[in-house]
Image (cartoon, rainbow, N blue to C red):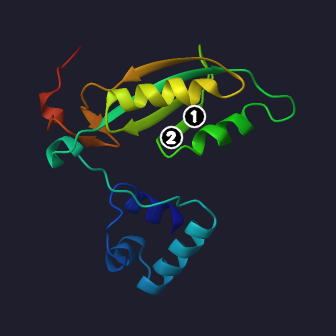
Amino acid sequence: MRERLLSAIENHARISTDDLAAITCSTPEAVESELSKLEAEKVICGYHTLINWDKAGEETADAFIEVKATPQKGVGFDQMAAQISRYPQVESIFLISGSCDFIVFISGKSMREIAMFVSEELSTIDGVISTTTQFILKKYKQDGFDYQGYSRDERIVTT
């Protein structure tokens, strides 16, 4: 039941309990109980709405920031990640492999606001060696949603 339930809500969080019960061959009460358990176990971490702010008429800016850092003795990168994640602008932070240590995704009202955050807050954290900011200029697809309306039928066929 768990796997079916998680698969069903992953891309459609507003699906009704009755529909989930039908999908999982269970009862609405059993579905609600399982959802509560999954939330308590932090398997389900939240329910999100993806908003196209361009269509809503709101000015926003998003950026990925590569952060090179020095790990701290005894805690590695965890303490720095916790410190960075406390900023409200930070949407996501990931420890990655490659040429930098973290990728930080942030949102702001403008590119200038993001630039000020990087220069005045992020880059001044002890242990941050350098940052590289990459602004998102146009969104094509996010979290499985195709902003441009491309369909699979329009893909270029390669052989």
Q: Residue at x 40, y 20 (%)?
A: 134
Residue 22 falls in which quadrant of the image? bottom left
Element class at badge 1:
strand
Residue bearing the label numbered 2: 92
Total number of numbered discs in the rendering: 2
73 relative to 2 in the view: left or right = right
The residue lying furthest to the right in this view is 74
Q: Residue at x 66, y 28 (%)?
A: 125
59 relative to 46 in the view: left or right = left
Q: Is residue 107 above or below residue 129?
A: below
Nearest the viewer among 114 and 22 is 114
Structural crowding at the residue carrying mark 2, measured as other residues with C-alpha within 10 Å and reported as few (<14), some (14–19) or many (≥20):
few
Quadrant of the snapshot with the C terminus: top left
Element class at badge 2:
strand
Q: Which mark is residue 94?
A: 1
Q: Residue at x 80, y 28 (%)?
A: 72
Q: Are marks 2 and 1 in contact (CB under 8 Å)?
A: yes
Q: Is residue 104 above or below residue 16?
A: above
Residue 71 falls in which quadrant of the image? top right
Structural crowding at the residue carrying mark 1, measured as other residues with C-alpha within 10 Å and reported as few (<14), some (14–19) or many (≥20):
few
Mark 2 vs mark 1, CA separation in Å: 7 Å
Q: Residue 114, position in %: x, y? A: 41, 30
Amino acid under disc 1? Phe
